[in-house]
Image (cartoon, helix red, strand yellow):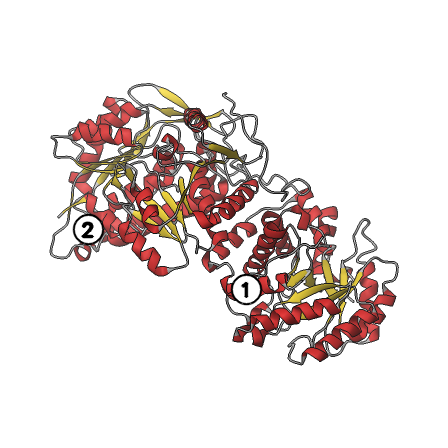
Amino acid sequence: MNKIETSEKTSTNLSFFKEWKYAPAPESKDHIQLKKQYGLFINGEFVSPTSKRYFDTINPATEEKIAEIAEADEKDVDLAVNAAAKAYNNVWKKMPGKERAKYIYRIARMIQERAREFAVIESMDGGKPIRESRDIDIPLAANHFFYYAGWADKLNYAFPNRNPQPIGVAGQIIPWNFPLLMAAWKIAPALATGNTVVLKPAETTSLTALKLAEIIAESRLPDGVVNIVTGFGKTGAAIVNHPKVNKVAFTGSTDVGKIIQKAIAGTSKRVTLELGGKAANIVFDDAPIDQAVEGIVNGIFFNQGHVCCAGSRLLVQEGVADIVIRKLKDRMETLIVGDPLDKNTDIGAINSKEQLLKIQDYIKIGINEGAELHQSSCSLPNKGFFCKPTLFLNTSQSHRLVQEEIFGPVLTVQTFRTVEEAIEKANNIPYGLSAGVWTDKGSKIFNLTTKMRAGVVWANTYNKFDPTSPFGGYKESGFGREGGLHGLLPYLSL
Amino acid sequence: MMNTVDIPNFRMSPVVDQVGVEERVARFTSRSIKKSSKLQALKLALNMIDLTTLEGKDTTGKVKQMCYKAAHMCDQLPGIPTVAAVCVYPNHVRTAKEALIGTGIKVASVATAFPSGNTTREVKLADVRFAVDEGADEIDMVISRGEFLEGNYSFVFDEISAIKEACSSSRLKVILETGELSTLDNIRRASDIAIYAGADFIKTSTGKIQPAATMPVTLVMLQAIKDYYYKTGKMVGMKPAGGISSSKLAIHYLVMVHETLGERWLTNEWFRFGASSLANDILMQIAKEKSGTYQGKDYFSND
């Protein structure tokens, strides 16, 4: 593993965790049920892949194998899409909305009942801290099913006089940063609007989607309405290119998003893309500084920074830059990095070795570009993929580090002088997914929200999600909205 | 050499976002403190208590009994620290002082027409001087909340300075009575006034008004202490008082102090709990950590 030179010095003489260390408080794994090998979930049952190939899924915190996952090839995808098409034509599109809703509610309740198990598996497979999977990912996933269950029989009220109709088979490809939550974001609105689904989870985080498949089977959802196929990019390509797929929904990197858009050009397939981001988190000199520092931490270190809407560019007004940075450095000393299953862990494992190498490359780029590196003085576990919370000070808009999405716990810090300069810097980027604004002045917030070219703008908070609120981007961050009433639109023809 | 600190304009005190404060507090309360770290915290919390009796019906007998308890928290359990101080009205300071000779336990006295503070400066100063002359190591004063809410920040500042002077070498704790200040912005402003006027400690409440100490209020006060420390390098203590009666809550407070100000504040020189029923709950938890089972509350003496 490449080692990066880090500064062990901290900014102040405040001292943390020397005399009083929190004893390990690991979440129990006793109650979870995992199989050694998982097949593909097609037409209501788990089947072996015709490819006969399996790959390992590992725990990124220990590098130990958890289970074997089937790799679906084109034939497997074809079976899944045909099952979905049959279910759509024979059952699901004919079923009244209020009947569809019952199944969706049932899935939501079953996720809640097994929330603890889902949370533990999510943390084992993906590396995120149990505090987040327990308090955010899993409850939000259940909430998305609850929310869209409510819409299923009210589509005519959502779009009055428009006779909303389902589209058909939705091919959905989701990323590894919020595995179950992204599955919920995709499946719930598709089912509520009467579409059927072929979903592919990311190869490093298939397990909770497969556990969701077990719930779907138990819920007696009609066979073939939801199919879950696992695999790599090729499996995803097979879904996108399948002629019977009517709608593609993708969340992931901008590069893959562009490939998908090229692939479906000239077809009648509908598409929504939720891609990368490089959000500005803007702190004005009249902001509540201590809470802004929390917001900065939450913006970039939530889920190890594996968040497309992460507040990865801090823009801080010059008058408060010194105090904000000093507080931020002290706050970083109190972030506990380590075992994702420990209830006190704030920052877990990087999702994969590949991603860790990418982040480390960017840290090297930042050093070579002459930005000032600061990392917390925490120690990292010997095994597994971990990265210290990292700041780069004295960066400018022209640094690559500022322009490119890192998708890790790395924050760049820039200063600005005026409101206009903040807006210009925030918008001067190919992405436009989200932004944060910190100020005590309401009028300043409204001024900024109208001028920010970003799909989500948070004011005096960051990384807040709710099923009722639409989410999506501008520019290279993609198009289409998920969540809220807007999230129904991509799955309906009006 | 004189160290000078500019007195800030208190109308420009940093603003506070209540939602953000509450979210931060929720993170402290979700820390899971187990095993050795829990035992360490319990002993620390016990050693930070100002064992308090502030009632109209206080008597010499009651104060003496409480002082004995303060020095002998639970003789059946080895290695149990004493509390930090006892806190009484000025007329009981001498009794407490004599009862605690040789224990190292401090005597704190409320003063300045506690709890309302509604009297003249002369009376308040006389109240403080009397308590100091009787032997009080620490003075817990109340600010004039009426003047504060009228916006007379200079009045409040000058009063605290005058009382600090009257304390001579006794340490001054300034009670903001946060339950009467209504907003976190006000609490931040009052904290700044007290700190710059010379408070050795800032304290949330008298215990006579609801709400008394809460974690969000305490966090805002800790942040004021931190900003002052950043600016001057000088430490100021913190004392939440009233309403902290369970070990679990006390540990949440310690986590909050730890992760906001760092470990140097984790001693009774810089952090106190104003509480009385908390002590026995902590003893019960310590006994449980050692024996594995909870004992009934009659196994712990109540004075």
Nearest the viewer among A101 and B272 is B272
Which quadrant would residue A475 be assigned to in this image? top left
Q: How many marks do you count on the picture? A: 2
- How crowded is the residue under tag 2: few (<14 C-alpha within 10 Å), some, or many (20+)? few
Q: Chain of mark 1?
A: B
- Residue at horizontal 67 percent and vertical 62 percent from the top: B199
Q: Which residue is mark 2?
A: A96
Position in image of residue A364 (x %, y %): 45, 25
Indicate left or right for B288 with A308 as reference: right
Which quadrant would residue A278 be assigned to in this image? top left
- Residue at horizontal 65 percent and vertical 76 percent from the top: B117
Residue B113 vs A415, above or below: the answer is below
Nearest the viewer among A311 and A467 is A311
Q: Chain of mark 2?
A: A
Q: Which residue is mark 1?
A: B189
Q: CA distance from mark 2 to mark 1?
A: 60 Å
